[in-house]
Image: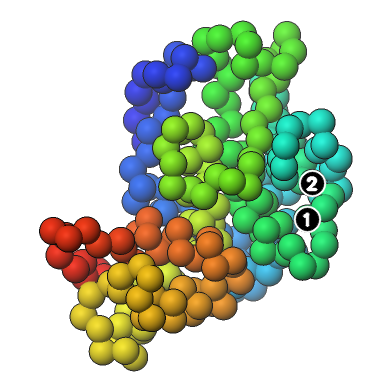
Amino acid sequence: MRWIPDRSGRFTRRPYYELSELDRRCEGIVSSFLRRKYQRVEYPMSTNDLIILVEQHVEDLDLYADLSNEGHSVEGVTEFVSGRKPKVRIACELQDPKRENRLRSTLAHELGHSVFHNGLDVYLRNPKFTNSPDNRMSYCHLPRDSGQSRVDWMEWQAAYASGAFLMPFTSLRRIAHKFLSDTGLISSPVLGSLESVWLISRVQKAFQVSTDAARVRLLQVDFLYERTASEPRRRIS
């Protein structure tokens, strides 16, 4: 990680992470947790274990929060408090069993904020981004954030971390290699192909995530790609 100027004006400077560093740190956090608890690493991580992991990184986790005043369709909020661990609130609607995958993604997203963005208050430049005189700063996760846009670097990093926590790179690569072996492909499938549908389905089942989350993660690590007319196929390495 290195520090670079924050062009958004929110901070004097902000952290820049290579994607490989985000992957390593997220996988390390998850695998260490699972080894301590079970003496082995197996996926998918249960939702209960994900909740416990978040609790270990925050001061307080509220799974039944009323976030109706936070803005349209906000499902999670991380509140940073100077000198303390963050507080995380999750919309009570996500306790619906039918929305468990959404709950998992939101928990992992807020975990990303808690791990990678806690302590940034010391670099605050603009007072309008604080909620109170003691440098409280809330950050919200909106469902329309697909992880593909880098307009807001904090949201983009947390969205990437969400996928990396739920679908750690080493296990994801193993599934992708097995898929190539089973299908006889020699390179990453193209998004929209029948093979891409099969691969997304495998990842979805292996890590208990939504189809959209699996698709975005596979695209981010080049195990799935959108090919232009001039772009050659990519090999999964």
The residue nearer to you, when weighing 163 against 193, is 193
Residue 224 found in image quarter: bottom left
Question: What secondary structure is marked by label 2?
Answer: strand
Residue 34 found in image quarter: bottom right
Q: Residues within 10 Å of mark 1 (few under 14, many from 20)?
A: many
Q: CA distance from mark 1 to mark 2?
A: 6 Å
Give the answer, above or below, for where 30 lies relative to 190. above
Q: Are marks 1 and 2 in contact (CB under 8 Å)?
A: yes
Residue kind at label 2, given as amino acid type: Ala
Query: Does residue 193 sit above or below 3 in this rendering?
Result: below
Q: Nearer the viewer, residue 90 or 70?
A: 70
**Apparent side of residue 166 relative to residue 85 in the rendered image (left or right):** left
Residue 220 visible in image: yes
Q: Which residue is mark 2?
A: 91
Residue drawn 57% across the image and 78% down it = 205
Q: Position of residue 207 (x, y in %)?
A: 56, 71
Type of residue at label 1? Leu
Question: Which residue matches tag 1?
Answer: 94
Q: Position of residue 56 (x, y in %)?
A: 69, 48
Q: Residue at x 62, y 56 (%)?
A: 105
- Residue at 44% from the left image edge and 81% from the top image edge: 198
Residue name at image x 15 percent, y 65 percent: 232
Quarter assignment of residue 69: top right
Q: How many marks?
A: 2
User: Which label belongs to residue 144?
Assistant: none
Classify the position of the C terminus by image quarter. bottom left
From what the image shows, is residue 77 above or below residue 53? above
Q: Position of residue 157 (x, y in %)?
A: 47, 41
